[in-house]
Amino acid sequence: MNRRRLIIAIDGPAGAGKSTVAKHLAAHFGLLNLETGAMYRAFALKALRGDIDPDDSAALARLAVSTSIVLEATPAGNRVLLDGTDVTGSIRDPEVTQAASKVSVHPAIRAWMVDLQREMGRAGGVVMEGRDIGTVVFPDADIKFFLDASPEARSQRRYEQASGPVAVESAPASEDVSQAVITRELRERDDRDRNRAQSPLRPAPDAVIVDSTFLTLDQVLERIESIVRERLAEQHLGDEHLATERPRSTERRGATERLVQG
Ligand code: DC
């Protein structure tokens, strides 16, 4: 049978833990992890560098014509190349985060990104993570998750991340970050991502909704992995993924790793 390999879609709002979960799930089942938000971020970075207003759809569409964005899945995480240059380290700045949400509103930009993402995932064998993967990019994905959490839990996680050793969205780790600022920025982004006219953030009708508000990373992973295992067995989809499944004890997960990214 000439069927493509497995595609798992993970969508959800900022701070729900998508990136962390997608990374572990991909490692666990021997899949590539593709983080589509990084592509919108890279394009937003180019717009900011070129002094282009992220609300100016005509100027952004012109910019897109001469832009190349490549997402590479590496064992250490995703690398994003903007016009051939690695910008992975620059796309998490707070300014870029807000601009990414703004540029992603424009239909021409979304159409371009969706084409690139379909091309990247075409052969399957991927966990693709974003806002519209199960609804638009791969409506025929084999398994779809919508990872959610209350706004309070999501902003609390971001706040902890900001006060900890990891660089974050709302401020460099060294700054004294106000939780109120993080909460406000997260809400602004939520509003924009959920209410845009083109492919707003929402669960696909056939997505499994996982609310991580009161769950730890391990609990979320256990739940998601067991659903994947069941589906693979039911649909005889990915025997090779079941075979490569790694026992949890051999996975390297930091003791303090939490649902902080994504
Ligand atoms: O997942 P992230 O926070 O890195 O995404 C940054 C922005 O990109 C997000 O606010 C909305 C947009 N985005 C999108 O519209 N569709 C996707 N599939 C992924 C991200």
Image: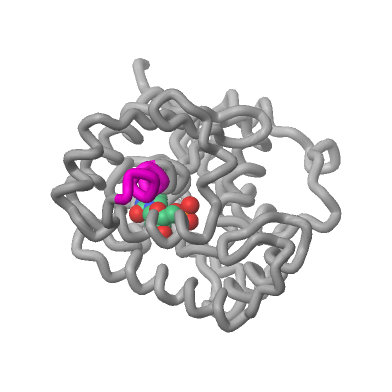
Residue at (50, 63) in percent of width and height: 14
Q: Which residues are magenta?
A: 43-51
Residue at (82, 49) in percent of width and height: 254
Q: Is residue 47 left or right of residue 7?
A: left
Q: Quadrant of the N terminus?
A: top left
Query: How is the structure coloured here?
Result: one colour
Q: Where in the figure is residue 229, as x and y percent of width and height? A: 60, 42
- Residue 95 in sight from this viewpoint: yes
- Residue 134 in sight from this viewpoint: no
Q: Residue furthest front?
A: 51
- In this view of the protein, which residue sits in the foreground, 116 or 61? 61
Vertical order, 156 against 91 (above or below): below
Q: Where in the figure is residue 27, as x and y percent of width and height? A: 66, 35
User: Which quadrant contains ligand 1?
Assistant: bottom left
> Magenta region's main secondary structure?
helix
Q: Is residue 138 left or right of residue 39?
A: left
- In this view of the protein, which residue sits in the foreground, 143 or 167? 167
Residue 203, picture quadrant: bottom left
Vertical order, 189 against 46 (above or below): below
Q: Residue furthest bottom?
A: 180
- In this view of the protein, which residue sits in the foreground, 153 or 42? 42
